[in-house]
Amino acid sequence: MAFNKIWYTVAFGLLLPFSYAHTDFFTSIGHMTDLINTEKDLVVSLKDYIKAEESKLEQIKKWAEKLDQLTDTATKDPEGFLGHPVNAFKLMKRLNTEWGELESLVLKDMSDGFISNMTIQRQFFPNDEDQTGAAKALLRLQDTYNLDTDTLSRGNLPGVKHKSFLTAEDCFELGKIAYTEADYYHTELWMEQALKQLDEGEVSSADKVYILDYLSYAVYQQGDLGKAMTLTKRLLELDPEHQRANGNMKYFEYIMAKEKEANKSSTDSEDQMEKETEVKKKDYLPERRKYEMLCRGEGLKMTPRRQKRLFCRYYDGNRNPRYILGPVKQEDEWDKPRIVRFLDIISDEEIETVKELAKPRLSRATVHDPETGKLTTAHYRVSKSAWLSGYESPVVSRINTRIQDLTGLDVSTAEELQVANYGVGGQYEPHFDFGRVSPVLCLHLFLLHKRCLSLFQVANYGVGGQYEPHFDFARANEPDAFKELGTGNRIATWLFYMSDVSAGGATVFPEVGASVWPKKGTAVFWYNLFPSGEGDYSTRHAACPVLVGNKWVSNKWLHERGQEFRRPCTLSELE
């Protein structure tokens, strides 16, 4: 349409002087000869317009052919396709950015049907926040699983079904997003990758000058002045008149000169102090690092002596009539806290039913605000979840009964089944799931017993989906998150795995070094509270981001009320 306007402007610009100044062209051949020249110019403009339109249509045709192949592959296995984090990021990028660029290219020169359909569909497209979120997810996966940019860019991830790669322009986009977040570490990594791919001969719209501009500044911000100067010199070789680069070079030279003077006056004792500080930094292992190591299958391992105490068994739910003749398979995953896994505990048919019930209701997951006690969204919990009640479906009711039979706990005061799906790079950082623990007696809990509806939670982990280290009880300084329920604290957690995951997606306990890996049809169970009602802080756990694949889980949080005689108090607070 833009070209159309130019064409009409040229056309009418040439015609208007004659039409307004001379309305009687037939009276003068001389004037008519001028019109011949005008028409000639119009024909030239028309040919240019046709050429531009043909070129544009050729671009659109190539785009359509490429997207036709891509969508044909993707629609055959949507979850498997989006299980590759690069595919998920590029989907966000295409729908938020590239389709908009195509719309600007096409405008009304195509059929009205396309434009009207595009306008309607556009309101349902991802926005800038989605594209940025997907980019951050890739960076998070990169850190968690120690992936270098070349591996991620080329899509060389374990267990991928639909291999995809990042172009230099994609890498540049990731670097820019990191830059806007003042994340200069990832800015450097991805700008260098973009530059590398361009140096290798990749044809791209990405400009080396722009890349070097971002890269040199990111390197400088991280304190590598020498490298920043080298990159700036390379930029100036490409664009000697680059104003900012020339200014930066003078500034870098000034800083370099000052540092040389400062180094001359530095003492050996100061150097020794710096070395000691570095040693201390290396010795310090924050929770985040422990969590990431466990996600990669590294970190603390159980001693052989402790491993010998772990067993597999057939379990009848303490002689529950339903399981005496058909006991379930149970195996120990960890000793302290005791984590057990039930095998073949939920069928594929039940899983599909739960997922179908949950999908229409999936919405952004929330957390309890530690100051207000109210539910709110948070950057450290990126997922969608839905809640299913037992009365809605015989399948959910049957699952609730199964949990009660095998745990021996009353599910009438439990929360609904929660189904959750973590998106690309989805996460839930370290937290507790139990609420503020009050020093109340077991008898007092019994007297205050109130009955609640049975609750059940299901979750679906998408690409990069994760649930970072957390407790299934809230932090001690939070308001009582479950006061309104009247059912006491979350005494235990039951977690179903409703899908296999090609890579990543483990449930990890950074306090003790345990890693529990997802396996479809199984469930894990542990107590969040000691029999005394005090919180077991060793149950701090998290769901690692899904590197490749899709992770669906559903969990049931059981509460204290109703368990007074099922799990009585002991004489010791921490027994």
Image: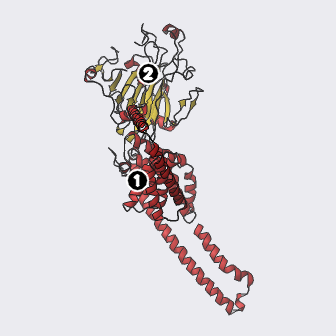
The answer to whether 95 appears left or right of 202 in the picture is right
Q: Is mark 1 on a helix, strand or loop?
A: helix
Neighbour tally class for label 1: few under 14, some 14-19, many 20 plus, Cα within 10 Å: many
Q: Quadrant of the N terminus?
A: bottom right
Relative to residue 335, is residue 422 drawn left or right?
A: right
| Horizontal and vertical percent position of residue 423 | 46, 40
Q: Nearer the viewer, mark 2 or mark 1?
A: 1
Is label 2 in a helix, a strand or a loop? Answer: helix
The residue under the point 49% across, 58% down is: 210
Q: Residue 466 or 68: which is nearer the viewer?
A: 466
Amino acid residing under circle 2: Tyr
Is 502 located above or below residue 90 in the figure? above
Q: Is residue 241 above or below residue 142?
A: below
Q: Earlier in the sequence, mark 2 or mark 1?
A: 1
x, y (%) of residue 352?
Answer: 40, 35
The alpha-carbon separation of the residues under discs 2 and 1 comes to: 42 Å
Q: Name the residue under label 2.
A: 537
Question: On the rendered image, what quadrant is the C terminus found in?
Answer: top left
Q: Is residue 127 visible?
A: no
Q: Which amino acid does label 1 sit on?
A: Gln
**Could you tell me if the residues under marks 2 and 1 are in contact, i.e. CB atoms within 8 Å?**
no
Q: Is residue 99 above or below residue 21?
A: above
> Looking at the image, which residue is at 42% across and 7% down?
571
How far from the left and from the top, in percent, is residue 118? 55, 56
Q: Residues within 10 Å of mark 2 (few under 14, many from 20)?
A: many
- Residue 548's spot in the image, x, y percent? 37, 42
Res 435 seen here: yes
- In the picture of the structure, the residue carrying the numbered disc 1 is 193
Q: In which quarter of the image is residue 552?
A: top left
